[in-house]
Amino acid sequence: MNDNEPLTASLIEAFVLCPMKYRLYRLGGPQGGMTRRVDAARALHAAVKHCLDECYRAGGLREWPVERLHEEFARSFNGAACADSREEEECRATGLRLLAEYGADHVADEATDVRVDLTVEGRLGDPAWRANADRRETRADGSVAYVLYSTARQPPSPGSLSEDLRTGVLQLLAEQLEGRPVEVEIHALRKRRIIDATKRPDELTAIEERATQLAASARSLVDPPALKGRHCRWCHVRSVCPKWAK
């Protein structure tokens, strides 16, 4: 990624945590390349998302019974990302369970114009922005929904989503693209529930103002500091951060 690439909510959240993290994510780091730590949770999410993407590309859950979802998961799950064989077995069992439950819960859903693994781009202020959605669909009542999958043990609470940048930026860019209001949902697979992440107009205005202000600060910072803290434990670029060089 270079400085001409669109901004994302994840990049701005990285800037809030640590300006150096933003720089390394944005520009590739002082050693010319980013490193990404792959762990079991990410591997599980990637495999579950892949299965649902393929399922909805093929026409949805009515076309893909649970047996086919399970076959695709067995092919796509990266067990090498797990710490040991026990963790691998647990992740495989979890993935199969989540897909079976999601299939049972949503097989009767009716939607048209379903698209998967979307990238939406637009402008918030001066810089270009980008957001990703796992699925976009038109519902029976004519409304348009953008869906994000969550395989986290604790998905975001409804109360925390009113100021959430990721879902807010997605809604802002999706409404630019669609030319009308859209809904944003988080499908929390472990909890078997749908979390409404749609923002009111006043919430969207506040998110846009905050996003553009943070973007301006991030882009104008010439010598970003590296802030060491608990967030370093999950940082993808820790191996090339000057705070951890020694």
Image (spheres, grey):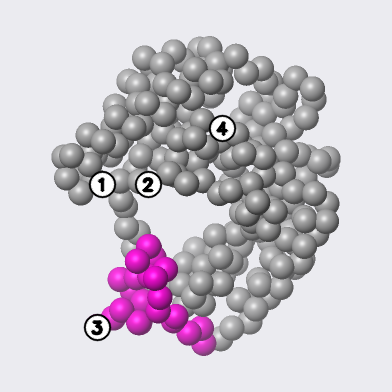
Residue 210 on the magenta span:
no
Distance CA(mark 4)–CA(mark 3): 45 Å
* Mark 1 vs 3, N-terminal side: 1
What number is the disc on residue 193?
Answer: 4
Distance CA(mark 1)–CA(mark 3): 26 Å
Q: Amino acid at mark 4?
A: Arg
Q: Is residue 75 visible?
A: no
Kindly give the residue lying farthest to the bottom in the view shown: 223
Rendered residue at 60%/59% (across/down): 9
Where is the C terminus found, in terms of image quarters? bottom left
Which region shows up in magenta? Answer: 223-246
Q: Is residue 107 left or right of residue 71?
A: right
* Mark 4 vs 3, N-terminal side: 4
The answer to whether mark 4 and mark 1 are in CB contact below 8 A is no
Distance CA(mark 2)–CA(mark 1): 8 Å
Q: Is residue 223 left or right of residue 170?
A: left
Of the two numbered discs 4 and 1 in the rendering, the one whose residue sits closer to the viewer: 4
Could you say whether the residue bearing mark 1 is in a helix, strand or loop?
A: helix
Q: Dot 1: few (<14), some (14–19), or many (≥20) neighbours within 10 Å? A: some
Q: Which residue is mark 1?
A: 81
The x, y position of residue 74, in whole percent, is 29, 27
Q: Amino acid at mark 3?
A: Lys
Q: Which residue is mark 2?
A: 42
* Mark 3 vs 2, N-terminal side: 2
